[in-house]
Image (tube, helix red, strand yellow):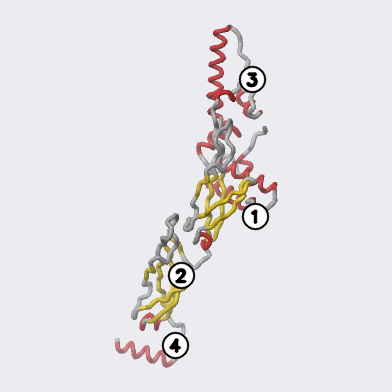
Amino acid sequence: MAFIDYYKILGVDKSATKNDIKKAYRKLARKYHPDLNPNDKEAELQFKRINEANEVLSNDDNRKKYDKYGENWQHGEAYEEAQKQQQRQSQQQYQRSSGSQEFEGSDYSDFFESMFGGGFDYRGGGTKFRGQDFNAQLQLDLRDVYTTEKRVLTVNGKNIRLTIPAGITNGQIIKIKGKGGEGRNGGPHGDLLIEFIITNNTEFKRDGANLYKTVNIDLYKSILGGDVTVNTFDGKVKLNIKPLTQNGTRVKLKGKGFPKYKKEGQFGDLYITYNIELPKTLSDKEKELFEELAKLQ
């Protein structure tokens, strides 16, 4: 098995920072994601390699192990301990029989054997190794996560049915147990970690389950009062504006915000801020009336 250069896969050097690695991974993951490259086996394989590389290099401990053990970073320490154990057993056997003990070859990679010299068989030890976790990203629009949705993701050639709860947030990571890499020696599968990238192309600003929006009203309505119809995330509502409403006044529409994550039927609030628009031009009559008003003040 040839040595796998994860730095080369992500296009970074060994001195790359965690931020450099994160940026490189996100760029490549978007490029080779199976959803954007359907039926492209080469892109699928490259996507798997990118995830493997990120799994190793984005974690400080994993990266140190990889720099030391190479592609066998997950099992390097265990292999070293196994080698020491076999050496101790060999020495004890030698002392008992005054002979030498010959061990069977292993199924581990040539890279590992060249590193540690081979010559031992750890398969009989019964140690189970957990599979590698996989990382993936899923890009959604804010409107996509207003309601609970079901999606089918293709990860490493496998279709995974996923229920996305309403109210999930940008950057949130969910774990799907057992959908990662296969374990070794009968060990459990790793997990699939999905990071959600939520883009907001709406007129609302989101903060958790609360939404914020600015509504323009004219000068006359702010002074005299009146009604205005505004859009909420799931429809329209009519608001009554009180006379002498000041610029920047904020009102709260309870329960008209975003769904609360994994809290069925619960919503945040929608906050409306009024922005008073002054007229850009005045007729002679309007100017005369404003002058009269000024005299009254």
Confirm or deny contact between disc 1 and disc 3 (CB under 8 A): no
Q: Secondary structure at mark 2?
A: strand
SS at circle 4: loop
Label 3 and label 4: CA atoms lie apart by 97 Å
- In this rendering, the answer to whether 97 lies above or below 152 is above
Which of 152 and 94 lies nearest the eye of the viewer? 152
Q: Earlier in the sequence, mark 1 or mark 3?
A: 1
Question: Is residue 292 left or right of 131 when viewed as pictured?
Answer: left
Distance (Cα) linking label 1 and label 3: 47 Å
Q: Position of residue 276 (x, y in %)?
A: 41, 77
Q: Which residue is mark 2?
A: 232
Q: Position of residue 80 (x, y in %)?
A: 55, 25
Task: Count the marks.
Answer: 4
Give the foreground label among 3 and 4: 3
Residue that badge 4 annotates: 282
Q: How dense is the environment of label 1, judged by Cα within 10 Å: few (below 14), some, or many (20 and up)?
A: few
Amino acid on which disc 3 is placed:
Glu
Disc 2 marks a residue whose amino acid type is Thr
Is the C-beta separation of discs 2 and 1 under 8 Å?
Answer: no
Of the two numbered discs 2 and 3 on the same chain, state the one appearing first in sequence.
3
Kindly indicate whether the residue at mark 3 contacts the one at mark 2 (C-beta within 8 angstroms): no
Of the numbered discs 2 and 1, the one sitting upstream in the chain is 1
